[in-house]
Image (cartoon, rainbow, N blue to C red):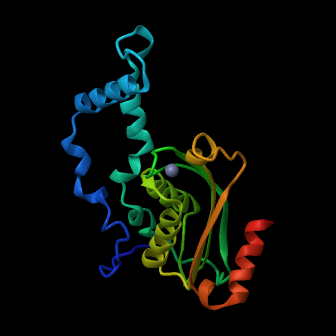
Amino acid sequence: MMREATDSTTTDPTSTDPAASGAASAVSAEQAEDAIRTLLRWAGDDPQREGLRDTPRRVAEAYRAWFSGYAQDPTAFLARTFEEVAGYDEIIVLRQIPFESHCEHHMAPIVGHVHIGYLPRNRVVGISKLARVVDAYAKRLQVQEKLTAQIAQCIHDTLRPLGVGVVVDATHACMTTRGVHKQGVSMVTSTVLGTFREDPRTRDEFMRLIRM
Ligand SMILES: [Zn+2]
C-alpha cells in the first residue's frame, strides 16, 4: 500500500532559507554573466579574449546545476511511502551517497559522502528518494553542519521514523586549495534524532552498519 503524506503539521526545515522566497529570480542571465565578467577581470584576465568569451554563459549554466537545490522542496521527495514491509522493523541504512556542494563562506566545492539510517515506524520510502533529499540540500550554499542537520530533520519531520541518523564525511576545497592548504583532510559531522539519540545500542548499530 502506498500513501501520500498529508500531515500539514510537518515542519519545513527550509522555511528560514531564501530557497522559497524566489530571491534568485530577480536576477537576469545577463546580469549574472556581467558579474562573472567582473570576476574574470578581478582575477586578472581579459573577459573579451577568445578563450573566455563564452565562459560567463557557461559559468551561469553551471551555477544553475550547482545550486539547483533552491528550486526543490526536499520534503516532497518523502511524501510517497510504502507500508507493505512484511513487519520489517530494523534499521534501514543507505551508505556512501556521493554529493557535491559549495561552502557558503568561499563558494568552494565540498565533496563527500552521506550515510543515512532510519528506524521506520510502519512505513518506508524508496531508497532513491533519500539520495534526492541529500541533493536538494547539497545543491545550495552550505556549511557541512547545517547540511547534516537539515537532511536528518527533513527525514525526521516528514517520514516520522522512530529515529534517524545522518553522517557526512567530506573534503572542503576552501581548505585544500587555499588557506591552510591541507590535502586529505576530511570533516565528519553527524546528527542523530529520536531513538538514535536516546538509545546507545541503536546508535551503535547504525555506526557499525555504515562502517561495513
Ligand atoms: Zn569555505
Q: Nearer the viewer, residue 86 or 52?
A: 52
Residue at horizontal 43 percent and vertical 26 percent from the top: 43
Examine the rendered structure and indicate whether residue 76 appears above or below residue 160: above
Residue at horizontal 64 percent and vertical 80 percent from the top: 86
Q: How many marks?
A: 0
- How far across and down, in percent of the image, does residue 70 sit? 35, 52
- How far across and down, in percent of the image, does residue 206 sit? 70, 76
**Residue 75 placement, left or right of 148:** left
Res. 66 in view? yes
- Residue that protrudes farthest toward the bottom in the picture: 198
- Residue that protrudes farthest toward the top in the picture: 50
**Residue 114 placement, left or right of 7:** right
**Residue 107 placement, left or right of 29:** right
- How far across and down, in percent of the image, does residue 41 sit? 36, 22
Res. 2 in view? no
Residue at horizontal 58 percent and vertical 41 percent from the top: 178
The image quadrant that residue 158 belongs to is bottom left
Residue at horizontal 77 percent and vertical 74 percent from the top: 208
- How far across and down, in percent of the image, does residue 8 sit? 29, 79
Q: Nearer the viewer, residue 112 or 183?
A: 183
